[in-house]
Image: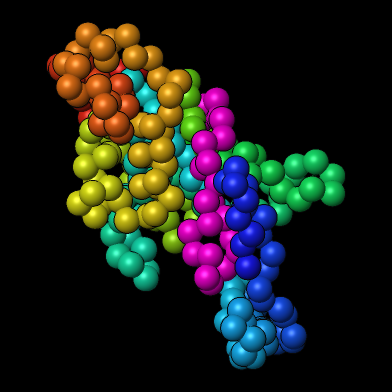
Amino acid sequence: MVEHFWDGTLIPSSPWALLARRELAANPFANVRVDTVRRPDGSIGPYLAVDTADMVRILAVCEGHVLIVEQHHYLTGPCWQLPGGRVDPSDGGMPGLGPDPMIAAARELLEETSISGRLTRLATWEPLPALTASRTHVYLAADVRTDDRRAQLDDTEADLAKRWIPVRDAIAATLDGRVRCAPSAAAILTLALRPRFPRRRLRRRLSASRRLGWLWCLTTLVPPRGRSTTTPRR
């Protein structure tokens, strides 16, 4: 049940109740369990859930380009997405608080692409809330640079390739199905909606009729004509 107040405040109180729990399968990456629950309508029945680590995705931006990795996934096939991976227990944070997603993001970016940068948190999402409580933490990487250390890909990433693409192409890729990773697609559009991007040049380039909505924000990230190269200049 969710109580609604006149000022828009929402105070959730769970209509679910856990009655019993049984583990079905477990490995170092995930646990599959079935809970016996009391549902919101009062009925009792099973609920299948998966416990797995949180994930990270990194949106690296350089001169109007976004860093994309292309990889063939076993379950879904070829896909474009942002660099990232799971948060490991070794990604140590403050004592007693568990691993730090920002440390995981810096590690994954370096391991997959040999790139490092200044990270700031962009958003946190729950991609599959009906199946797992695992979250995806997304970070923006600015001031990116190539690191001397080589990428350290695991055995499932041998075919991983990286490419810098113009932001306008990254947006198009989220709409035509090339970027099918939901947090990656959401991150590309979320970045475009952030208000902190400079708008002075945008005002010169857009007519008044186009300074509206998300299109107005997206255009701030599009580089000037003649600089839409496949690799950012450093």
The picture quadrant where one finds residue 40 is bottom right
Camera-side residue of 188 and 86:
188
Where's residue 65, x and y in %? 31, 28
Tell me which residue sits at (30%, 65%) in the image.
Answer: 77
Whether residue 138 sits left or right of residue 75 in the image: it is right
Residue in the image at 59% along x and 73% along y? 50
Q: Looking at the picture, tell me which residue is in the foreground, 56 or 21.
A: 21
40 versus 2 height, above or below: below
Looking at the image, residue 131 sits to the left or right of residue 215; the answer is right
Q: Could you say where residue 163 lies in the image, as x and y percent from the top left?
A: 30, 38
Q: Is residue 231 visible?
A: no
Q: Which residue is drawn at the image coordinates 20% and 51% (left, top)?
A: 176
> Measured from the top left, where is residue 114 in percent x and y?
47, 35
Q: Is residue 132 magenta?
A: yes
Magenta region: 116-138
Q: Is residue 166 above or below residue 199?
A: below
The question of residue 125 being in magenta is answered with yes
Specify whether 39 is left or right of 200: right
Residue at left offset 62%, top offset 39%: 102
